[in-house]
Image (cartoon, rainbow, N blue to C red):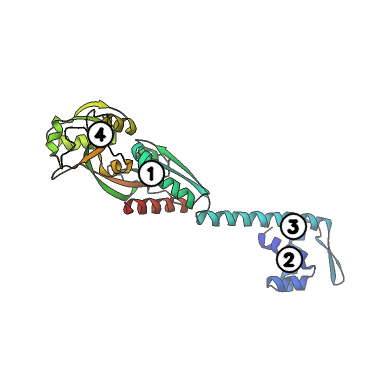
C-alpha cells in the first residue's frame, strides 16, 4: 500500500466518480481505476460497489477512508513541524557558557533571543568545562575562551578582550591612568581559584614575565569577587568589557601599559554535529551582539 494510492482513493471518495477524480488529480481514468483495484486486491475486499456508471463506498471503504485521511493529516503535521523547525519556529538548543559571562553578558542576549524565537526551548549551562561538554554532546554549543586546538571542534571567533586592573574608587591606585604589568607582583589581588580559566590565563601571562600574582583571596563567584574589590580589599584582573557590562560606578578600570593579557572568546561545536536553524540563529545573534559591543 502506497501513499499515492491512498491519495487517489480519497480523490475518488470526494468525487464519487472515477473520471472526475482522475481529471482532478491529473492522471488517466484507467490508471486511477488500476490503482484502486490494486488497493482492493491487497486488502482482499471491495472498496466501492459499482452499479452501472455509479459507485458507492463500502463499509470497508469507509474504514479505509477514515484511516487514509488520518495518515495524510499526520504526514502534513510532520511536514509542517519540520518546516517550522527549519524556520526557527520550534526546536531545542543547549549552550554552555562561563559563569561570569552568563551573569553579566549573556542573560540580556537570552531575553532578546526568546522574544524573537519564543518557541525554541533554550537550556543554558554555567560551566568551566565547556569544551568537554561540547565534545561529549552534553551541550550543542559552547561559549568559552579559545581552547587549545582540537580538530574535533569548530571555533567561531566572537571577540578579543583585553584585561585590566580593577580596583575600588578608594584604592590607592584608583587615580592612575595606566599601570605597568610588572607592578602586579606587588599588588594584592582577589582572583578566581587556581585552575579556573580566567585565573590560569592571567597567571600564565605573569609567569612568562618572571613573576606570579600576589593573591590574598580566592572565590569562584564573580559577584563575590567584585563585592570584595568594591569593599577595597585588594584588586582583581578581569576583561574590560566584562567589568563595563556590570555598570558598577564605584569600580575603576586601569589599563596596562604597552602589553596586557587578552582572552579570545569563541563559540565552539563539534565538527561532526549538524547545526539546526535554532543553533544557527543563536550563533548569528551572539556574533552580531558581540560585534555591536
Which residue corresponds to mark 2?
11
**Quadrant in which the N terminus is drawn:** bottom right
Q: Is residue 26 left or right of residue 59?
A: left
Q: Element type at marker 4? A: helix
Mark 4 crowd level (few <14, some 14–19, many ≥20, 10 Å Cα): some
Q: Measuring 21% from the left and 36% from the top, which residue is drawn there?
A: 202
Q: Measuring 41% from the left and 47% from the top, which residue is drawn there?
A: 109
Q: Is residue 237 left or right of residue 107?
A: left
Lower sequence index among marks 2 and 1: 2
Lower sequence index among marks 2 and 4: 2
Lower sequence index among marks 1 and 3: 3
Which residue corresponds to mark 3?
42
Cα distance between the residues tagged 2 and 4: 70 Å
Q: Of tags 3 and 2, which is closer to the observer?
A: 2
Q: Which mark is residue 199?
A: 4
Cα distance between the residues tagged 2 and 1: 54 Å
Lower sequence index among marks 1 and 4: 1
Does the image show residue 135? no
Lower sequence index among marks 4 and 3: 3
Amino acid at each position: 500500500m502506497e501513499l499515492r494510492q491512498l491519495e487517489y482513493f480519497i480523490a475518488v471518495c470526494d468525487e464519487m466518480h472515477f473520471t472526475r477524480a482522475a481529471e482532478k488529480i491529473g492522471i488517466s481514468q484507467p490508471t486511477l481505476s488500476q490503482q484502486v483495484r490494486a488497493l482492493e486486491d491487497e486488502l482482499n475486499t471491495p472498496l466501492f460497489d459499482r452499479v452501472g456508471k455509479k459507485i458507492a463506498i463500502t463499509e470497508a471503504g469507509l474504514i479505509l477512508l477514515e484511516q487514509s485521511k488520518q495518515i495524510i493529516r499526520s504526514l502534513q503535521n510532520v511536514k509542517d513541524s519540520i518546516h517550522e523547525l527549519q524556520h526557527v519556529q520550534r526546536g531545542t538548543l543547549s549552550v554552555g557558557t562561563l559563569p561570569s559571562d552568563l551573569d553579566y553578558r549573556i542573560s540580556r542576549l537570552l531575553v532578546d533571543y526568546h522574544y524573537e524565537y519564543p518557541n525554541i526551548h533554550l537550556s543554558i549551562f554555567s560551566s568551566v568545562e565547556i569544551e568537554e561538554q561540547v565534545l561529549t554532546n552534553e551541550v550543542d554549543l559552547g561559549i568559552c575562551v579559545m581552547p587549545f586546538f582540537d580538530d574535533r571542534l569548530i571555533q567561531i571567533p566572537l571577540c578579543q578582550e583585553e584585561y585590566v586592573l580593577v580596583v575600588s574608587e578608594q584604592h590607592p591606585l584608583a587615580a592612575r591612568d595606566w599601570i605597568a604589568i610588572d607592578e602586579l607582583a606587588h599588588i594584592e589581588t582577589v582572583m578566581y581559584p587556581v585552575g579556573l580559566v580566567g585565573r590560569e590565563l592571567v597567571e600564565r601571562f605573569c609567569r612568562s614575565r618572571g613573576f606570579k600574582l600576589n593573591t590574598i583571596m580566592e572565590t569562584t563567584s564573580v559577584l563575590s569577587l567584585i563585592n570584595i574589590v568594591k569593599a577595597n580589599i585588594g584588586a582583581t584582573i578581569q576583561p574590560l568589557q566584562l567589568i563595563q557590562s556590570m555598570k558598577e560606578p564605584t569600580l575603576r578600570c586601569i589599563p596596562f601599559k604597552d602589553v596586557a593579557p587578552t582572552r579570545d572568546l569563541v563559540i565552539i561545536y563539534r565538527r561532526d554535529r549538524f547545526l539546526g536553524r535554532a543553533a544557527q540563529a543563536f550563533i548569528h545573534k551572539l556574533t552580531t551582539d558581540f560585534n555591536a559591543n
